Image (tube, rainbow, N blue to C red):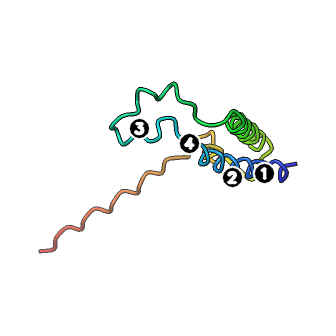
Amino acid sequence: MYHFLLTIHILACLGMILFVLLQTGRGAGLQMFGGGGDSLISTPSGTSFMKKFTAGLAATFAFTSLFLTLLQNRSGMASVTSNISATPAPIETPAPAPAPAAAKK
């Protein structure tokens, strides 16, 4: 099941990249900031089929991402905090340094 969903996920990724690149932009690059902004909202940006297919691929990508996360094997994973013991470690005090020997006369 996991490998089947992974294959569908990869195909949805590649298909979405392809279909997004095939669509024309709304502002067509805004003509390098020289115009085109006034017709940005009202211009069609592709066929209805392209829009619906891209939306379907995006939904497929989202659902397969969620299901792959749920199906992922987490047995080998461990939290950073799982290695910390509940009781504090005893604090070792350093041994006192020996007193310097008295100078001989």
Q: Position of residue 37 (x, y in %)?
A: 40, 30
Q: Position of residue 68 (x, y in %)?
A: 76, 44
Pair 2/1: label in front? 2
- Amino acid carrying label 1: it is Leu
- Amino acid carrying label 3: it is Leu
Q: Which mark is residue 14?
A: 2
Q: Is residue 88 left or right of residue 67?
A: left
Pair 1/4: label in front? 4
- Amino acid carrying label 2: it is Leu
N-terminal-most mark, 3 or 1: 1
Q: Secondary structure at mark 4?
A: loop
Residue underneath mark 4? 24
Between marks 3 and 2, how big is the CA–CA gap? 27 Å
Q: Secondary structure at mark 2?
A: helix
Compare residues 59 and 37 and report the one nearer the observer: 37
N-terminal-most mark, 1 or 4: 1
Query: CB under 8 Å between callouts 3 and 2?
Result: no
Q: Position of residue 88 (x, y in %)?
A: 56, 41
How many callouts does the rendering have? Answer: 4
Q: Is residue 32 left or right of residue 6?
A: left
Mark 4 neighbour density, 10 Å: few (under 14) some (14–19) many (20 or more): few
Between marks 2 and 1, how big is the CA–CA gap? 12 Å
x 45%, y 28%: residue:
39
42 relative to 1, above or below: above
N-terminal-most mark, 4 or 3: 4
Residue underneath mark 1? 6
